[in-house]
Image (cartoon, grey):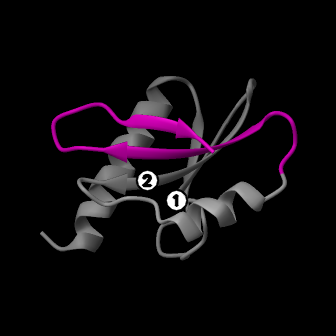
């Protein structure tokens, strides 16, 4: 499986987790932006970067995401997900 297909699979898996929790989720796959998913609920907005397997968020990308200014009810998150496990979530 190519890296692109693997990434798409894991993004869809994360989307399903969020939708089950009651979020409306929009994918920005292919945009090359800082976030893969935008999840919205009455509690707020979650901007999510998804990485799969052994892929890691680079220090440069982490810093760029942290510099983005958001409203108080918006969280910036990094989700690392493995094939047979739940995602590890880190707030940035």
Residue 75 in the image: state x and y as whole percent.
70, 39
Instruction: Identify the residue under disc 1.
Output: 36
Mark 2 falls on what kind of element?
strand
Q: Residue furthest front?
A: 59
Q: Residue at x 47, y 66 (%)?
A: 58
Rendered image quadrant of residue 13:
top left
Sort mark 1 into few (<14), some (14-19) or many (20+) by Cα contacts within 10 Å: many
Sort mark 2 into few (<14), some (14-19) or many (20+) by Cα contacts within 10 Å: many
Residue 4 in the image: state x and y as whole percent.
29, 72
Mark 1 falls on what kind of element?
loop
Q: Nearer the viewer, residue 38 or 49?
A: 49
In the rendered image, which quarter contains the C terminus?
A: top right
| Image vertical order of residue 54 relative to residue 15, above or below | below
Q: Nearer the viewer, residue 32 or 77?
A: 77
Looking at the rendered structure, which numbered label has been put on residue 50? 2
- Callout in the foreground (2, 1): 2
| Image vertical order of residue 28 relative to residue 78, above or below | below
Q: Are marks 2 and 1 in contact (CB under 8 Å)?
A: yes
**Residue 34 magenta-highlighted:** no
**Residue 75 magenta-highlighted:** yes
Residue 89 in the image: state x and y as whole percent.
47, 35
Q: Residue at x 37, y 59 (%)?
A: 56
Q: Which residues are magenta?
A: 70-92
Q: Residue at x 31, y 51 (%)?
A: 10
Left or right relative to 6: residue 89: right
Q: Residue at x 40, y 42 (%)?
A: 14
């Amino acid at each position: 499986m190519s890296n692109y297909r693997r990434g798409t699979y894991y993004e869809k898996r994360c989307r399903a987790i969020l939708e089950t929790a009651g979020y409306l989720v929009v994918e920005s796959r292919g945009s090359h932006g800082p976030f893969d998913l935008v999840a919205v609920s009455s509690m707020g907005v979650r901007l999510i970067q998804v990485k799969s397997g052994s892929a890691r968020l680079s220090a440069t990308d982490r810093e760029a995401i942290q510099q983005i200014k958001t409203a108080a009810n918006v969280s910036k998150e990094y989700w690392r997900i493995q094939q047979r496990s739940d995602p590890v979530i880190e707030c940035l």
